[in-house]
Amino acid sequence: MKRCTDNDTDRHIEHIALDGKFLEFSYDFHYLLWFLVCGSWPVCFAYIIRQSF
């Protein structure tokens, strides 16, 4: 019975660790996406201004 409880506890900890890793990956992806948007916005804006004048 105790062995069964230990296995459930280990599985629960592993599940939390996997969720944490997924959240960390998701956070990094959003940061990268935000960086690309902020980095490309001035370039696109300058290109539009250059085409206008």
Image (cartoon, rainbow, N blue to C red):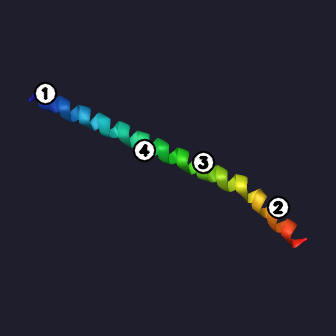
Question: Which circle's residue, 3 or 4, is located before the other in the chain?
Answer: 4
Please determine whether, in this image, residue 22 is positioned above or below residue 5. Answer: below
Return the x and y of residue 18 as percentages of the image width and height: 36, 40
Instruction: Say few, some or many: other residues with alpha carbon within 10 Å of mark 4 (under 14 / 14 to 19 / 20 or more).
Output: few
Residue most extreme to the right: 53
Instruction: Say few, some or many: other residues with alpha carbon within 10 Å of mark 1 (under 14 / 14 to 19 / 20 or more).
Output: few
Question: Which circle's residue, 3 or 1, is located before the other in the chain?
Answer: 1
Instruction: Say few, some or many: other residues with alpha carbon within 10 Å of mark 3 (under 14 / 14 to 19 / 20 or more).
Output: few
Question: Which label lies toward us, 1 or 4?
Answer: 4
Residue holding disc 2:
46
Q: Nearer the viewer, residue 22 or 47?
A: 47
Please determine whether, in this image, residue 52 is positioned above or below residue 21. Answer: below
Residue holding disc 4:
22
Q: CA distance from mark 3 to mark 1?
A: 43 Å
Q: CA distance from mark 3 to mark 4?
A: 15 Å
Q: Nearer the viewer, residue 18 or 4?
A: 18
Q: CA distance from mark 2 to mark 4?
A: 37 Å
Residue most extreme to the bottom: 52
Residue most extreme to the top: 2
Residue most extreme to the front: 51
Question: Which label lies toward us, 3 or 1?
Answer: 3
Secondary structure state at the residue bearing disc 3: helix
In the figure, residue 42 lies in which quadrant?
bottom right
